[in-house]
């Protein structure tokens, strides 16, 4: 009899457990997660174009004939290096003539000065008239003016001669050469292009709504195929509906050869926070301007309003409303959670 009662008791327990289990199976299964304390970065993802910080067009300062071209395309040059020399015969002739004229006016000035000193001395002895002194003074002043004019003419002639030798304005690489020896060129004609390929930057155009998130000095990373480069926001140039952002690339490490004008992926770090409450962004819902999550408690989904901060692709900062001890429901598939819904882990 005792054995029979025992069997009945065991069977009853099994049936009760089976009923409870079958009832639980009817409730949707969800994944439970908890908030974490960590750091978070908010980034702005966009694209940009590789450009050079220093690039110069060498243009003809005056018309003339090219005498020598001292560099070729793809040559590296240093600041102050001679690039192009124009025919200098006419300019050298003008310098010599200006120098001869200056020497002449200097001699005339010396003679006029000596005459003025002599005339002034004789006037003191009352051996000459006052008019002769005035004439000597006028002659001296005229000679002085002529000397100064000759000096300026020599300076201009020398400057013109110097302008026939074109120097590199900065170090870089000759990416384009448009002239040959013996070629006649016009004033302002482009002769050569030089680019510093070791100092590169990325130009980014952003709509004003996105540009407001960008500040000077913010870190940026640039992805060029399999290459990851770093840099920082160097300048922000606002326009009517957009802004041009210039990112200077880090040159502390030698950069590989990169083609100018290449499109690249850009990630600008707009905000960084340490020791904040973070939650998987998929667990956060929105209703109008309100953000909320579903807490898991005793098998029931309970709605909890939260205030969110910065976010990235995977996580969101929770400013208030949650603690690391809270259990949050991360629904799976097409399940639509509701307040008071029974769920199971």
Image (spheres, rainbow, N blue to C red):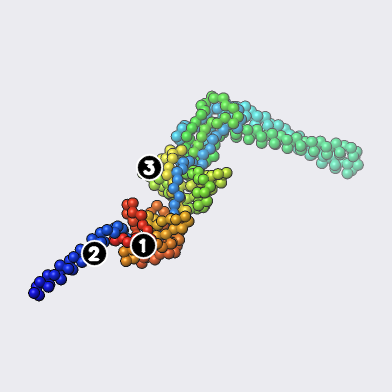
Residue at label 1? 340
Question: Which numbered mark, 2 or 3, is in the foreground of this view?
Answer: 2
> Is 186 located above or below residue 202 in the figure?
above
Look at discs 3 and 1 and give the one toward the viewer: 1
Per the model, the C-alpha gap separating discs 3 and 1 is 50 Å
Q: Please give the label number shown on residue 20.
A: 2
Q: Position of residue 335 (x, y in %)?
A: 33, 54
* Residue for point 37% across, 55% down: 282
- Name the secondary structure under disc 1: loop
Given residues 7 and 183, the one toward you in this image is 7
Location of residue 8 (image quadrant): bottom left
Residue 322 location, quadrant: bottom left
Q: Are marks 3 and 1 in contact (CB under 8 Å)?
A: no
Location of residue 92 in the rendering, given as x and y in whole percent from the top left corner: 62, 30
Q: Residue at x 72, y 32 (%)?
A: 104
Disc on the earlier residue, 2 or 3: 2
User: Is 112 situated left or right of 164 in this image?
Assistant: right
- Pointers 2 and 3 in contact (CB under 8 A)? no
For label 3, the residue is: 225
The dot on residue 109 is none
Q: Residue at x 32, y 52 (%)?
A: 333
């Amino acid at each position: 009899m005792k054995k029979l009662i025992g069997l009945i008791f065991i069977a009853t327990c099994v049936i009760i457990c089976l009923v409870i289990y079958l009832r639980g199976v009817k409730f949707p299964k969800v994944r439970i997660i908890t908030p974490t304390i960590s750091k978070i970065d908010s980034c702005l993802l966009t694209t940009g174009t590789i450009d050079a910080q220093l690039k110069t067009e060498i243009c003809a300062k005056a018309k003339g004939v090219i005498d020598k071209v001292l560099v070729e395309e793809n040559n590296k040059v240093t600041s102050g290096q001679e690039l192009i020399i124009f025919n200098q015969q006419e300019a050298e002739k003008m310098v010599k003539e200006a120098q001869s004229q200056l020497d002449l006016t200097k001699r005339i000035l010396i003679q006029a000065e000596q005459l003025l000193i002599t005339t002034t001395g004789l006037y003191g002895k009352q051996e000459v008239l006052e008019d002769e002194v005035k004439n000597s003074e006028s002659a001296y002043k005229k000679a002085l003016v002529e000397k100064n004019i000759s000096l300026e003419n020599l300076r201009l002639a020398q400057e013109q001669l110097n302008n026939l030798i074109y120097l590199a304005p900065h170090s870089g690489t000759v990416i384009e050469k448009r002239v040959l020896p013996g070629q006649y060129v016009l004033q302002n004609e482009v002769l050569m292009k030089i680019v510093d390929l070791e100092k590169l930057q990325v130009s980014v155009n952003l709509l004003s709504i996105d540009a407001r998130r960008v500040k000077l000095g913010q870190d940026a990373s640039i992805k060029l195929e399999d290459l990851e480069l770093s840099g920082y926001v160097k300048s922000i140039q606002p326009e009517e509906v957009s802004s041009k952002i210039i990112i200077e690339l880090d040159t502390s490490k030698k950069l590989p050869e990169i083609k100018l004008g290449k499109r690249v992926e850009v990630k600008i770090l707009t905000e960084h926070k340490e020791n904040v409450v973070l939650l998987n962004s998929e667990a956060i819902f929105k209703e109008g301007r309100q953000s909320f999550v579903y807490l898991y408690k005793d098998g029931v989904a309970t709605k909890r309003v939260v205030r969110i901060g910065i976010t990235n692709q995977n996580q969101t900062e929770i400013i208030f409303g949650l603690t690391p001890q809270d259990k949050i429901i991360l629904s799976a598939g097409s399940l639509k959670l509701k307040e008071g819904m029974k769920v199971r882990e």
